[in-house]
Amino acid sequence: MGRYIIKRLLMVIPILIGVTLFIFLTLSLTPGDPAKLAMGNDATEEQLQAFREQNGLDKSIPVQYLTYMGKAVTGNFGKSFITRQTVTSMIGARIGNTLFLSFTSIAFTIIVSLIMGVTMAVKQNSLYDNTMRVVTIILTSMPQFWLAIMMILLFAVKLRWLPSSGLGTFKQAIIPIICCACSGITMCTRTTRASMLEVINQDYIRTARAKGLRSNDIIWRHALKNALLPMITVYGRMVASCFNGSVVIESIFGINGIGTMMMNALRQKDIPAIMGGIIISACVITVVNLLTDLAYAFVDPRIRSHYRRASGKKKAVRNTPKEGTVTA
Amino acid sequence: MENNTAATGSRSEYKKHSLWTDVWIRLRKNTIAVIAIIVFLCILIVCLSAPLIYDYDEDIVQPDISRQMQAPSKEHILGCDEIGRDILARIIWGGRITIIVSFCALGIAFIIGIVLGTVAAFYGGWAETIIMRIIDIIMSVPSVLLMITLATLIKPSIPNLTFVVAFGLIPNQARIIRGQALQVIDQEFIKAARVQGASDFRIIVNHILPNALSPIITTTILDIAYAVMTISTLSFLGLGVQQPNPEWGTMLNSGRQYLRQAWHMSTFPGVALTITLMALTLIGDGLRDALDPRMKR
């Protein structure tokens, strides 16, 4: 197990190098001069040249990339071309909002989807189950940004109950969190329901019933524990999609987070800020991937023993199902 | 040899026929999926025939200040936007743009995905390592962020949008095709074909692809939904289709600024988008159940 964790952690390094290289190349090869965008249109040629020299933009692309990575390894992500602040402090000031939005949405998603999924499975084909299935299908198909607009229209413009932007107060946070959680809730509810239905008809559940255990105990302890196993993959995907969705949600509600920072940086071709934002997001996704796989291996004794047996054999590695991998 | 090919050809055709007839019979029993298919076909037909219904210059881009933000009425069923253009006309024309872009993107992604996926599965070794690592790398950046990055850096235009959406679809396509190919690649009939002297290309096209078809079709339907969603999200953020061209996301973006004055501007394009995505999701679900009855819940 330990060897597996170390191997997976080491695999993160080439992925991060690949991601940074890819983004760096795209940034350098696409049209748009960062110096011009930073200094404005009326900057003289000398000023532009000075700016390029100061930020190392006059060197060749491989040299630029290596210099950047050399600094980044030591935790120095450089200074923004536009705001002149260090990227680390820019991210530090904003990551709180993004993490708050993502993590409250994730918690909200897990709680709501567990309750809904399990109750729907227990009352399969009842009026409640059927109504909720229709509702989840409608909500799955609703794009996040439209749901956000509709909620602002209803709760902020028509009913005037909630403010339409920001994240500071409890009232401000309600709409963004619900919008951010919505796609995850529908996805997780559907899978929880399906997974519970599969478990609920198993023999050991019948045995537990025959032994006279309380119905609630059987559902929430015996059945749920087994039904949760396939849910780990879905939770991994949900965490990634929450982090993903927060970019759009931030821009709609004017929340000052990583997503907004990236959008602004991209418009002005602020290379250090873009790279910093991408590295942070890639790290989050990679860590979530790793945790999903580890949780899978940790929870399911069959997989745990499989890894023990198969370590080092190429064939086994090739055929290992990539179920735990996040599709971001 | 000729005789032999003819025999395998007709046999595979017979098999294909029976599988798809089975799928169709099962799908037909699924009322919801059938309704979804009909709805989607209607959307396709109406949107693709937009040029026959509306004149682009007159109905779609021509402003008319006198009907500025008019609420829905008999003349303009879904109302008018901030410079007096009919919203229904723009929704239908916008759907045409979305559908054409998503199908083109899907086509590109499909071809590249098949090439990468089969090459990775078939040749293994370093080819596989390189392709799969690149896919891992692309997938480890949050997709919305990646799409936004690409769309911002290359100038927003319809061909560029197609390219960006296709780029987002390739990794998943390639991975699924590789997974399916790996399942059949060690089986006896592939070895038999190789012993007969079939070329790699022939084995891939005649034996591996047909066997990987059913999951690919389900993914393809869901990929169309993903493409539609990405196109409108990018347009909503101002990175896709640009004004005055209509697109559902673009229309929602301009409607967002007039929420207080004109609710209809930001409601109806979203309804169109949701109905399209819902139809696609339901078709995908129905197809999955029909292709693999064991999966049916």
Image (cartoon, rainbow, N blue to C red):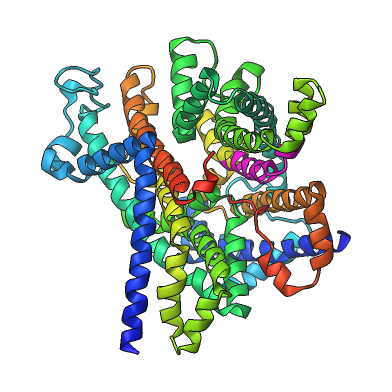
User: Is residue A280 at all visible to an observer of this figure?
Assistant: yes
Residue A111, position as x, y percentages in the image? 69, 27
Task: Name above or below for residue A142 compared with residue B50.
Answer: above
Residue B85, position as x, y percentages in the image? 20, 30
Instruction: Report the magenta residues as a range.
Output: A225-244
Task: Name above or below for residue A325 compared with residue B184.
Answer: above
Q: Quadrant of the N terminus of chain B?
A: bottom left
Q: Which residue occupies the foreground of this view, B215 or A199?
A: A199
Is A227 magenta? The answer is yes
| Residue at left offset 54%, top offset 46% | B295
Residue A90, position as x, y percentages in the image? 67, 43
Q: Quadrant of the C terminus of chain B?
A: top right
Q: Main secondary structure of the magenta part?
A: helix
Q: How many marks?
A: 0
Is A193 magenta? The answer is no
Q: Which residue occupies the foreground of this view, B271 or B289?
A: B289
Residue B227, position as x, y percentages in the image? 41, 49
Q: Is residue B291 left or right of residue A310?
A: left
User: Is residue B54 at all visible to an observer of this figure?
Assistant: no
Q: Is residue A154 left or right of residue A75?
A: left
| Residue at left offset 15%, top offset 35% | B59
| Residue at left offset 68%, top offset 33% | A200
Residue farthest front in this picture: A210
Task: Name above or below for residue B65 compared with residue B164.
Answer: above
